[in-house]
Amino acid sequence: MTHDIYAIGNALVDLEFQITDAQLEDLGIQKSQMTLIDAHRRSELLGQLSDRQPRRTGGGSAANTVVALQQLGGRAYYACRVADDAYGHFYAEDLTHHGVRSCIHKSKSAGHTGTCLVMITPDAERTMSTHLGVSAELSLEEVEADAIASSSIYYMEGYLAASPTGLEAALAGRDVARNCGAQLALTLSDVSMIQFCRDGLLAMLKEGVDYLFANEAEIKAWFGTDSIDKALREAAQLAKTVCITLGAQGCAIMQAGVTTRVAAPTIQPVDTNGAGDMFAGAFLYACRQGRTVTQAAQLATAAASAIVAQQGNRMTTPDLLKVRDQWLQAIG
């Protein structure tokens, strides 16, 4: 196979701001969730934050996942849409810098590249206000059957459930992947997607997937339960391998009726942005290397903890490779 993973998702440039809880409340933003905003609201928020210099990085949930996998030594392809603007060129250069192949070079749309205003509060929690821009127009044009056919895993970003054309593209790619024998993976992405776009997520889950990724709040919201064990048992009906991140408590993995729990190392949290994306990328990388579920969970938890202990949604390649090397040494 040419690629370990072919992912489809929203191309977003992250603009990350350090902010207090009181300031977040003044901005009228609901903490800890992702909220879709229009261009007017984006301009309004940027105006209110004009006295702050944001940290700018390439972003988007699935993009963070494939960049992590590529940094660890895997091979990734990312399907997305950007505009022919400064942010779009920045985004394309960022993917190229990390060695991730994409369809961006084929065409760039008129309009504005998607942006995500990420508010980090002192408790390290991230709150996101996302303007999709042309990413909302992601469509069948970005689905490349040949690239999917040459990939071992087809990875769908749950955020695409909010876009009719994006959902259509994700489902078309899923059908190609299933016909080619590729494994299927889905991340539930955010509680807001479960609340408002459940039907789209159900369409992505149709006939089940091989890997399902979610955090504790998302999986409990999906099944309407406060019990993580019950949620895991229910989720096992949807996916062969269910991966639930539990923050400081590490993770819980359900596969073939067996639950595996891996504790997280003790860290001082700085920024939770990108932690779940990193977990998925590291977990799938380890699986592609033929590692056991427990070993994959150990790497994923270590990598997710490492990114929470620093600022930003991604790690530098040298720092992430240090995590990988320590993991390799630990598992022998």
Image: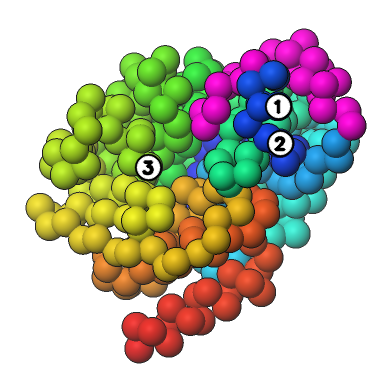
Residue corresponding to mark 2:
19
- Label 2 CA crowd tier, 10 Å (few <14, some 14–19, many 20+): some
Is label 1 in contact with label 3 (beta carbons under 8 Å)?
no
When asked about the image quadrant of residue 61, the answer is: top right
Mark 1 Cα within 10 Å, few/some/many (few <14, many 20+)?
A: few
The percent coordinates of residue 45 (x first, y second) are 77, 20
Disc number placed over residue 23 in the picture, else none: 1
Residue 63 % position (x, y): 59, 46
Residue receiving disc 3: 215
* Image quadrant assignment for residue 292: bottom left
- Where is residue 249? Give x, y as percent: 34, 56
Label 2's element? loop
Q: 189 or 100, which is in the foreground?
A: 189
Which one is earlier in the sequence, the residue at label 1 or at label 3?
Answer: 1
Quadrant, the N terminus: bottom left
Quadrant of the image containing the C terminus:
bottom left
Q: Gap between marks 1 and 3, in whole Å? A: 26 Å
- The residues colored magenta run 28-51
Residue 177 visible within the image? no
Distance between mark 3 and mark 2 Cα atoms: 23 Å
Q: Is residue 47 magenta?
A: yes
Taking depth in this image into account, of 239 and 194 the one nearest to the observer is 194
The residue under label 2 is which amino acid type?
Ile
Q: Amino acid at mark 3?
A: Asn
Q: Residue at x 53, y 18 (%)?
A: 163
Say whether residue 33 is visible.
Answer: yes
